[in-house]
Image (spheres, rainbow, N blue to C red):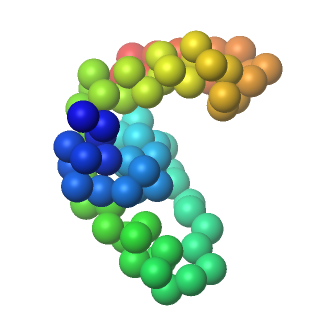
């Protein structure tokens, strides 16, 4: 089961929750009312294990933060 299915949310909402669950400020861009409503529907946080799983997938695939050493380290240090 994906996190989106588990929480009944969209993949975008999971991404926003990931940032918020790490204690980061998240500033999403939303040009449409539909997307704005989707963004404010992030009324949950991911567990530490879920955040770490996403980080391990990002690190394994080098999708995000490529070339910035240590940016994905210590998510919950």
The correct choice, above or below, for 44 with respect to 72 in the image is: below
Horizontal arrangement in the rendering, residue 64 relative to residue 33 (left or right): right
Nearer to the camera, 40 or 69: 40
Instruction: Kindly identify the residue that appears in the image at 42 percent across and 50 percent down.
Output: 11
Residue 76 falls in image quadrant: top left
* Number of residue marks: 0
Residue 72 visible, this angle: no
Q: Residue pushed farthest right?
A: 67
Q: Position of residue 34 (x, y in %)?
A: 46, 81
Q: Is residue 67 left or right of residue 40?
A: right
- Report the quarter where the C terminus lies: top left
Task: Report if residue 46 is visible in the image.
Answer: yes
Q: State whether residue 21 is above or below residue 65.
A: below
Q: Compare residues 23 and 57 and report the one nearer the observer.
A: 57
Q: Which residue occupies 35% across, 40% down? A: 21
Query: In this image, 65 relative to 13: left or right?
Result: right
């Amino acid at each position: 089961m994906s996190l989106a299915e588990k929480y009944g949310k969209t993949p975008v909402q999971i991404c926003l929750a990931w940032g918020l669950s790490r204690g980061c400020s998240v500033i999403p861009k939303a040009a449409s009312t539909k997307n704005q409503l989707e963004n404010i529907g992030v009324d949950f946080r991911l567990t530490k294990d879920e955040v770490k799983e996403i980080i391990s997938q990002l690190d394994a695939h080098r999708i995000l933060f490529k070339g910035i050493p240590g940016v994905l380290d210590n998510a919950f240090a």
